[in-house]
Image (cartoon, grey):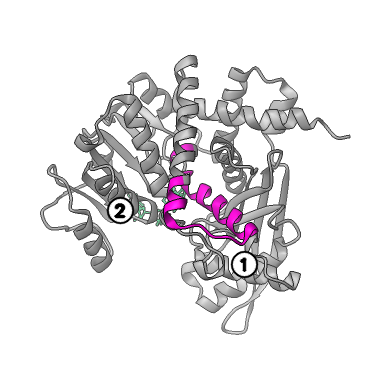
Amino acid sequence: MPENLDQFEIAVAQVRKSAEILKLDSGMVEILSKPKRELTVNFPVRMDDGSVKVFTGYRVQYNYSRGPCKGGVRFHPNVTLNEVRALAAWMTWKTSVMNLPYGGAKGGVIVDPKKMSRNELERLTRRYTSEISIIIGPEKDIPAPDVYTDSQTMAWMMDTFSMIKGYSVPGVVTGKPLSIGGSEGRSEATARGAMYVARAAAKTQGMDTKKATVAVQGFGNAGSIGARLFSEELGSKVVAVSDSKGGIYNKNGLDMRKLLDHKAKTGSVINFTGSKAISNEELLQLDVDMLVPAALENQITEKNASSIKAKMIIEEANGPTTPKADEILHKNGVFLLPDVLANAGGVTVSYFEWVQDIQSYFWSLEEVNQRLETLMSKAYNDILPIARKENIDMRTAAYVYAVKKVVDAHRIRGLWP
Ligand code: NAD
């Protein structure tokens, strides 16, 4: 039977697996397997040609037992309610893994932003924000950027929410530009967090990062900054990278600064001087120390998992490994740092941004990075003993760690009424 890749079913299956280890009762499992609140909005937007189009958007608040909800907003033609549910569930576990005082949420609008003008996108963003304004706010639910939304989108959201309130509310969204309460270090936080976790893991796994080779799939925001940081701050040799047009390989290592220039000039990593062309599939199967999937979901599956030769996988992307592939990798002794931990640097610095906005007191880049490293290493070093004690993979251990804290919050708060 082919693998079931419905994202929400995967998300629920992961919760159920950790619930068995935690011996949770069926009532608690049911609470954790369903989103707390879902809002669907159908809203009109005036297009540049004067016509009116109706768009559909969602905001799902999965769980807020540990604090206000947190999670990005995605603009994409393939957005579905089930996908938003899954992403909101993952945010719940990710904030708990990182010990952030948040629950999890996610939003999305079914739209192809590449087919819209900047003015149309601004009107769409503002109307979507006003539609979901009844459930968001610094104490309720704090959106952030995700696929095809960015700091400009967040600035429009912050402005719209502030206009409704009649005063400026910077803490309503994170990932904002610095000029309106953004945080230093936010743009490279995801990749930097992944690098800190890889460094912590290398220490406990007996890997010398200065001698390690790295392959990175995807060369966008997460992947390209990640590749540079692994090279510059860990001293590792990045031997292969790829993007949607193809991959490149050089066994002696790729010069990151020159490669970033090449990508900026040509729009892709392919045809980089001194490198050999490889396919994305070949990249995943390279004999390297660290493999960093930083592109799309479902890249490592039951079909290719047994061909993976990397010693360690650091998931910068969300959901790059399927549940069946997880089992194969664990059996083969591949040490996998799961997305809920490895790419949680972004939401962690988002949390720092919200704290700074609420206090109206802003930190230096050094303070942000140092606090990020502290939280990333703590999460890693808390989860590792669970994996060792229970003889489970790091993803399951991360879920056990995260789910337990959400369960503790439910139990201590009690059931109302
Ligand atoms: P991005 O759009 O900036 O980059 C995606 C990259 O993947 C591009 O270089 C693209 O060419 C490449 N790509 C697309 N299809 C590919 C294929 N078939 N093979 C190889 N490469 C391919 O996106 P991003 O922000 O870097 O996000 C990448 C992943 O990281 C996503 O899963 C995202 O959810 C996750 N993530 C990102 C952040 C963040 O702060 N940017 C935070 C958490 C998780």
Q: Nearer the viewer, residue 356 or 4?
A: 356
The answer to whether 361 is drawn above or below residue 87 in the figure is below
As drawn, which residue projects farthest toward the right?
417
Could you tell which of marks 1 and 2 lies nearer the N-terminus? 1
Number of residues whose C-alpha sits closer than 10 Å to that of mark 1, classed few (under 14), some (14–19) or many (20 or more) = many
Give amino acid for label 2: Asp
**Residue 401 as seen in the image, left or right of residue 365:** right
Q: Residue at x 52, y 47 (%)?
A: 348
Q: Nearer the viewer, residue 288 or 282?
A: 288
The answer to whether 176 is drawn above or below residue 342 in the figure is below
Give amino acid for label 1: Met
Q: Is mark 2 within 8 Å of ligand 1?
A: yes
Element at label 1 = helix
Quadrant location, the C terminus: top right
As drawn, which residue projects farthest toward the bottom?
50
State the image coordinates of residue 345 (x, y, percent, origin top left).
46, 46
Q: Which residues are magenta?
A: 341-370
Say if residue 258 shows up in the picture: yes
| Main secondary-structure element of the magenta-colored stretch | helix
Residue 31 appears in which quarter of the rendering?
Answer: top right
Q: Residue at x 50, y 38 (%)?
A: 340
Q: Residue at x 58, y 31 (%)?
A: 402
Residue at which label 1 appears: 157
**Mark carried by residue 314:** none
Q: Residue at x 60, y 55 (%)?
A: 354
Q: Nearer the viewer, residue 267 or 236?
A: 236
Instruction: Tell me the distance, in whole angstroms, between the alpha carbons under discs 1 and 2.
Output: 30 Å
State the image coordinates of residue 187 (x, y, percent, origin top left).
43, 58
Residue at which label 2 appears: 243
